[in-house]
Amino acid sequence: MTGIYVLTILFGVIGMMISWRLKSKFKQYSEIPLQSNLSGQQIAEKMLADHGIYDVRVISVDGQLTDHYNPSDKSVNLSADVFHGRNAASAAVAAHECGHAVQHAKAYSFLQFRSAMVPLLNIANGFMPILLMIGMMILYSTGNATLLSIGVALFALATLFSFVTLPVEFDASNRALAWIKNNQIVNASEYEMSKDALWWAAMTYVVAALAMLAQLLYYLNLLGGRRSND
């Protein structure tokens, strides 16, 4: 169990390092203007149009790296820096988020599965932390593992969600990179920068998923160890 605990901490540290590296890469690539001089908004709108998608809005939102696609109202939400930016980082992010819109339009199976999990996960997240905390207290004081088992089951659902997210994110990046390359949105060096930026972004999801798996194994070992002592 100690090994799993150390592994969880390790993934947490790695996650912070990758997050720092991601921000550093985006800052670096945001300072290099695109040869095409297209803004993130223009790139997003062009990619949507090229895929025959005309019912998705491209809007600007507050924050940094807050970019996302919202399937419920069909909107590509780009942070102001990406929306107005005319650089490799903006091109990568704008195209990536439109990649999700293309997935939605084409009924990409992993995106559908992930979207179907969201309502249940929202409910689970409201109860999971308190169930885990109180469940562990009850387990150590009385030996009863019922409440903790429920909390761990909800945590397992959240872990599954984090792993289902991986193919969704990688596929969106692949669609984005293929489109910006084939349509000459970026030149060769700008393509490599876009590819690198999206790779670091993807790594944040990978490490987060592995960290959740490590925590899940910790809880499962805790339950298994307690039951073996009964």
Image (cartoon, helix red, strand yellow):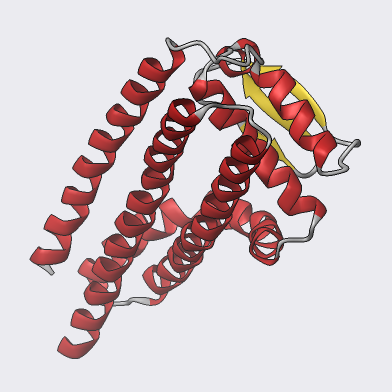
Query: Does residue 64 lie above or below 115 as drawn?
Result: above
In this rendered view, identify the residue nearer to me: 226 or 50.
Answer: 50
Residue at point 59%, 57% (across, down)? 121
Residue 94 is situated, as x and y percent measured from the top left of the image, at 63, 29
Q: Residue furthest left?
A: 2
Can I make out residue 35 in this image?
A: yes
Query: Does residue 29 lie above or below 49 as drawn?
Result: above
Residue at point 70%, 25% (across, down)? 43
Q: Quadrant of the C terminus?
A: bottom left
Name the side, left or right, on which 15 lies relative to 6. Answer: right
Residue at point 37%, 39% (across, down)? 200
Residue 133 is situated, as x and y percent measured from the top left of the image, at 34, 55
Residue 209 is situated, as x and y percent measured from the top left of the image, at 38, 56
Q: Quadrant of the N terminus?
A: bottom left
Q: Image quarter for residue 27?
A: top left
Name the side, left or right, on which 129 lies relative to 140. Answer: right
Name the side, left or right, on which 60 lies relative to 219. Answer: right
Residue 159 is situated, as x and y percent measured from the top left of the image, at 44, 62
How many marks the image carries: the answer is 0
Can I make out residue 73 in this image?
A: no
Residue at point 32%, 51% (across, down)? 207
Query: Does residue 223 lie above or below 180 as drawn?
Result: below
Query: Does residue 13 lie above or below 44 as drawn?
Result: below
